[in-house]
Image (cartoon, rainbow, N blue to C red):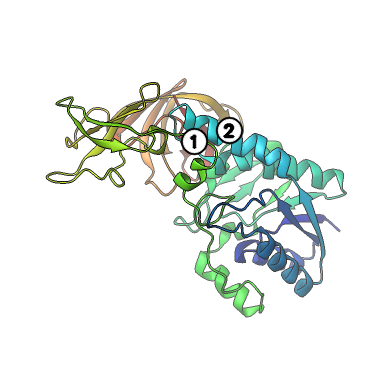
Amino acid sequence: MTRVYVGMSGGVDSSVTAALLVEQGYEVTGVYMKNWTQDLPGMKCPWADDLADAKRVAVQLGIDFKVFDFEKEYKQQVVDYMIDEYKAGRTPNPDVMCNQEVKFKLFLDTALADGADMIATGHYARTENGKLLRAKDENKDQTYFLYRVTEVALQATLFPLGGYLKSEVRELAKERGLYTASKKESMGICFVGKVGIRDFLSQYVETTPGKIIDKQSGETLGYHDGAIFYTIGQRHGLDIGGGLPYYVAGKNMDKNEVYVTTQLNDENLWKQQIELQSLHWINEAPTDGEYHVRIRHRAPLVPAKLEGSILTLTDAQRAIAAGQSVVIYDDTTCLGGGIIT
């Protein structure tokens, strides 16, 4: 019998994942990854509640349950990476790094060393012969966050929810009477629950107020509380009154200045050519040619031409920021991608 360790976060998706695998005849062990336990001012980290929920579901399903403590590695490889990227003026994606370093490396290696044959998670994605395919539910598809996973890891991974819609997963949970059937989705940063990125960064980075400058006129329009908090294309949170809306068109981290414009067609807000670094291909590297790309989670797939590390989009796209991931697809197959320079 195949032994599968399921990453159980205490949410409905991973609960249904475990239930389906039990029904499919696998020998299932539930594992809660203890990645982050720190409270922030005014916000209690939900980890203890999530652990209790995961345990309750494991008891319901009659499966073994373990806790893997990855807190130290998680801080180093995900949280510190994110903070350093923001300090450098970029816009990172910690969920991508969490999947690359923790779930599909650390968790996988620890599970296999502990006697598992495979791992499983509640991601909305499909895998076939070491390839990563988009989920049936296009609205929930999470391949964008999984593009840096390796072929070797995918061959040892099950994604039971890949063929379901989110509404169907909720229904499966209710039919089985799972404790987490009506639990709400967790939003915000993957590891701090409902805390916004600004509140989180404020705990780790010393920030000082700086000028918000009109890119066209050079005039100082107002003041911000730290250039680190702003990203290209951002409109909200500027607190500049009157007239047309302003958009962030650039920033200078050394001078702690944010540059804004009312020109929606400003060249800094739109990009047609993107240079990628830290390229990662799940299988063999694709040949140069025409593909579809996603420049952020839930953004529409857009046609683009790949030439080495340069992507040329058929139509210019708005609010493309350094540090973000671009993920490349050939039909429903996720090939991999890279990080915007």
The residue depicted at 71 percent of the width and 62 percent of the height is 51
The residue depicted at 56 percent of the width and 71 percent of the height is 170
Outermost left residue = 243
From this viewpoint, is residue 111 visible? yes
User: Is disc 1 placed on a helix, strand or loop?
Assistant: loop
From this viewpoint, is residue 17 visible? no
The residue that mark 1 highlights is 92
User: Is disc 2 placed on a helix, strand or loop?
Assistant: helix
Q: Position of residue 284 (x, y in %)?
A: 60, 28
Task: Quarter of the image for the C terminus: give it.
Answer: top left
Picture quadrant where residue 278 is located: top right
Q: Position of residue 287 (x, y in %)?
A: 50, 24
Q: Amino acid at mark 1?
A: Pro
Query: What is the crowding at mark 1: few (fewer than 14 residues within 10 Å), some, or many (at least 20)?
Result: many
Picture quadrant where residue 45 is located: bottom right
- Is 167 or 246 nearer to us in this picture? 246
Q: Earlier in the sequence, mark 2 or mark 1?
A: 2
The residue depicted at 71 percent of the width and 44 percent of the height is 71
Q: Amino acid at mark 2?
A: Tyr
Q: Is residue 67 above or below residue 283?
A: below
Q: Position of residue 152 (x, y in %)?
A: 71, 37
Q: Is residue 94 above or below residue 122?
A: above
The residue that mark 2 highlights is 81
Instruction: Name the side, left or right, on which 167 lies relative to 152.
Output: left
Task: Quarter of the image for the N terminus: give it.
Answer: bottom right
How far is the residue under mark 2 from the one under mark 1? 8 Å
